[in-house]
Image: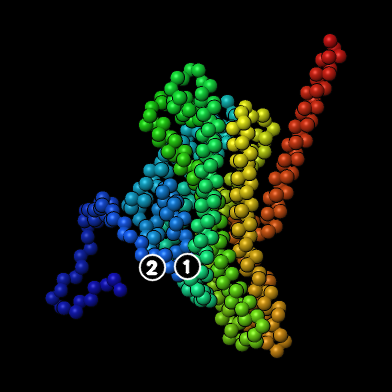
Amino acid sequence: MGFVTLDNPEAKPLIRPNWLTWLKRRGRSCLRWPKAQRRAGRDDWIFNGTFHEAVRGVLTMAQLFSIMPVAGILAKDPRKLRFTWTSGRAVYALFCAVGIGFLCTMSVFFFASKRFHFQKMVTAFFYTYNLYAMYRFGRLAQRWPALMARWTQVDESLPVQRDMFERAVLAHRIKLCSILVMTLSLSEHLLSIVAAVHYSNNCPAVHDPYEAFFKSNFAFVYYYFAYSTLRGFLTKFFNVICNFIWSYVDLFVIVLSMGLSHSFRRINAYLFLHKREKMSEQFWGEQRQKYRNVCDLVTTVDDHISGITMLSISNNLFFICVQILNSLNSRPTFVHTVYFWFNLIILIGRTLAVAMFAAEVNDESKRPIEVLRTIPRDGWCLEAKRFAEEVTTDTIALTGLKFFSMTRKLVLNVTGAIITYELVLIQFHKDEASDVDLCKLKRMDTL
């Protein structure tokens, strides 16, 4: 396929185009007017049960905010996926990366050049984190077509799903989880804007409310540059992109964990269906091979997204510690109090959700042992023994750059670390308050 057959001896062979012809073709493809959207038909609403089909909506939402610039995500066939640097999606992603890189550079320079302040460091960390996340998603977008082709191949080798409901359950779970996470993220961002307006209205030096808002919230930019409407729009636009990426990193890890655990769940459901039946050695050999294929898929996916998983966990822990530290401070208005606790609850909930959904992959990979232990003596065979050894000895889980595995124990460790940090801060605050009271008493005695 893809080669010209010269059945006719007089046919001319293909001539490779020069760089000018290649550049013209690329220019036409970039400037081509997009095709009109067709009306959805019955086939568009029927799911075939693959992860590629279930994750299309999440990738479409990501491309609206400049990440995962992969073409062909709405096609049901994963072989139509492709990544090119000259596509409109890639150009849009590069434009946003340049803008976020500018904000990152200015925030780091503002933190390093002026008096060191903790809040300035948090701002610099926020934009640096989002810039690196865009880089990781850009690297993943280049490998996404091959990864989805491999994932679809594994999905097709798993036990057949019986009805339309089973084929659509993964897509609906991913859709509901995405709507919930992004709605909470949008609510948190709107509350932050309402809280920020309070400070901008109290600035007597600036009479324009829009200018006061941007100068108070983006001081690291407008300390060096004069304010203008275009600069204000671009600054806020890139800030919205960063807030979306900040939440989408967690959502992406959750979605991929749901897809991997669903693959294990299909194998487990098939094994439990034949739990009380006496199966041959060939049956256990086939099931062990299917289980091995999903385990290899988990390893492949982890090689691609372990950096993103590490980003998600480290970012959430950092901002939880920041918010716990800020809990010792008083807040000026009721809106600031609502925003603070709402933000902290969302952070803790998102961290636990990422850990629990990722740990579900490890939990589902251990469930086949429940069926293997019920095999009678006369039904025990070499393939069943090998299957049981793989389930009990192998650790199948997503990791954070291979430093730690996403299991149930990680949830307890993270929860314990957060509680310990909170108790240490409370004790430190009490000791500091007691020292202040002692100083006041000594002053009263001297008087």
Instruction: Give the amino acid type for the residue marked by disc 1 in the picture.
Output: Thr
Position of residue 388 in the picture relative to residue 191 (left or right):
right
The residue tagged 1 is 50
Q: Is residue 375 above or below residue 346?
A: below
Q: Position of residue 96 (x, y in %)?
A: 41, 43
Q: Is residue 365 above or below residue 373?
A: above
Residue depicted at 37% across the width and 46% down the height: 92
Residue depicted at 31% across the width and 59% down the height: 38
Of residues 250 and 178, the one nearer the viewer is 178
Position of residue 132 in the picture relative to residue 93 (left or right):
right
The residue tagged 2 is 43
Instruction: Give the amino acid type for the residue marked by disc 2 in the picture.
Output: Asp
Q: Quadrant of residue 339?
A: top right
Marks 2 and 1, how far apart in space? 15 Å
Position of residue 58 in the picture relative to residue 350 (left or right):
left
Residue depicted at 24% across the width and 73% down the height: 4
